[in-house]
Image (cartoon, rainbow, N blue to C red):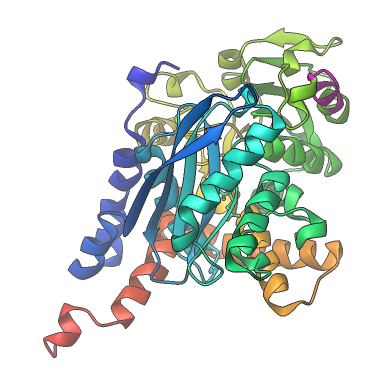
Amino acid sequence: MSKTTAPKVLDDARGRLEFIYERLDVSEDARQRLAQPQRVIETAIPVRMDNGALRVFQGWRVQYDTTRGPGKGGIRFHPDVNVGEVTALSFWMAIKCAVVNLPYGGAKGGVKVDPKKLSRMELERLSRGYMRAMYDILGPDMDIPAPDVNTNPTIMGWMADEYSNIARGQLPGVITGKPLGLGGSEGRIAATGDGALQVLKIWSERNNRDPSSMTVAIQGFGNAGYYFACAAQKLGFKVVAVSDSKGAVYSDEGLDVHAIWEHKNRTKELKGIVYSEKSVDDEKDVDHIDNDELLTLDVDVLALAALENQITKDNAKDIQAGLVLEIANGPVTSKADEILADRGIPVLPDVLVNTGGVIVSYFEWIQNRTGDYWTAEVVGERMRARIAEEAATCFDLAENENISFRNAAYMQGIRRITQAMDDRGNQGYFNGD
Ligand code: GLU
């Protein structure tokens, strides 16, 4: 969609709060605290390129709120990253961590760069440069980054290493999503997709829907989209379409997601060992459709695993799916939310659906700090149990209060954040009311 029609993601994100504040009777103090981020750091990262030239990249870290614990949230490498987007993403992290009751606030980082155009060594220098620039505001008890769009375990490993070099000591708990050999957790790579499937499974059970009779289209075939597709297929869902930024493939028989993933990885060039340069559109035995067509397919579940602002007021009327599952952050705008609600299409919201990633990040942080490492089974079980418990309260709240799933999740998150704020004393307390 065109950038000019996209609403400002931050205004859109915060615009959703008024309804929640009224429902929860949130104190004026808490409203004021949540009206802006606590801290916004912008930095310039100089990187020596392989040809000897110097390039300077803009980078940000935003800590939206740290009332409930240290900041937590990924770092995104993308040419369109800007401070408004990073702030919105940090705000969502604060909500998200509270929705699933992790002892964290919300933060997010970003670098304005197209990583596909960097060599591996340039990428390493940029990643280490980001950590050097942000060293003073990051730490296991301050703010803990993780992967996000276009960043991965290798990059987290470089950053953790840079942090430890500066600190003159091993502090793996400063960053999560690391490779296993550097203190990463079993199950972290698949966690966002696995967690999203868990939420979909709970929703299906509550609605007496049998996965084997349900079709799924997935927008976005990066890490989250791929692992979600695998987990969905394993449970019996039929994945009929997937897309990446360059195109989409469709088969009403169901797709072989492993073959498509392998193809996507196989066809990349040398410098694309970390990033695929080719599109899933190159896959052969399937129909090729464009991204807009994927969004409007008549499927049971439309899973959005790409970027924000994908369903807007312009295309919400064309959505035919029975259910929208937000695996990415912010893929449905608030206007589109209203249109989908009017049309009776439920949306399972990002701040619940994609929490599998940050939950396993939390487990990684615990393991780093205790030195007690868990098996993949233990990680998976604990993640699914946490999501099941928190999703059940959100679903009950939505039903009992007759509100959308998003509003229910926001109520759960905002209640916990504002409770923590009020526990430090608010106007009523200090006035002796
Ligand atoms: N970037 C992921 C998210 O948006 C993971 C964050 C984390 O693990 O800290 O939820």
Asked if residue 36 is among those painted magenta in the image, a careful observer would answer no
Magenta stretch secondary structure, dominant: helix
Q: Is residue 400 visible?
A: no
Asked if residue 263 is among those painted magenta in the image, a careful observer would answer yes
The residue lying at 74 percent from left, 32 percent from top is 274
Magenta-colored span: 262-269
Q: Is residue 337 visible?
A: yes
> In terms of depth relative to the viewer, which is nearer, 147 or 389?
147
Up/down of 174 relative to 42, above or below: below
Instruction: Pick the quarter of the image with the C terminus.
Output: bottom left
Q: Position of residue 238 (x, y in %)?
A: 79, 31
Q: Position of residue 240 (x, y in %)?
A: 76, 23
The residue lying at 32 percent from left, 39 percent from top is 12
257 displayed left or right of 143 = right
Instruction: Pick the quarter of the image with the N terminus.
Output: top left
Q: Position of residue 9 (x, y in %)?
A: 36, 36
- Count the labels in the image: 0
Q: Quadrant of residue 37?
A: bottom left
The residue lying at 78 percent from left, 61 percent from top is 380
Up/down of 294 relative to 426, above or below: above
Q: Position of residue 146 (x, y in %)?
A: 60, 52
Up/down of 115 relative to 5, above or below: below
> In terms of depth relative to the viewer, which is nearer, 216 or 342?
216
What is the residue that sits farthest to the bottom in this orientation? 432
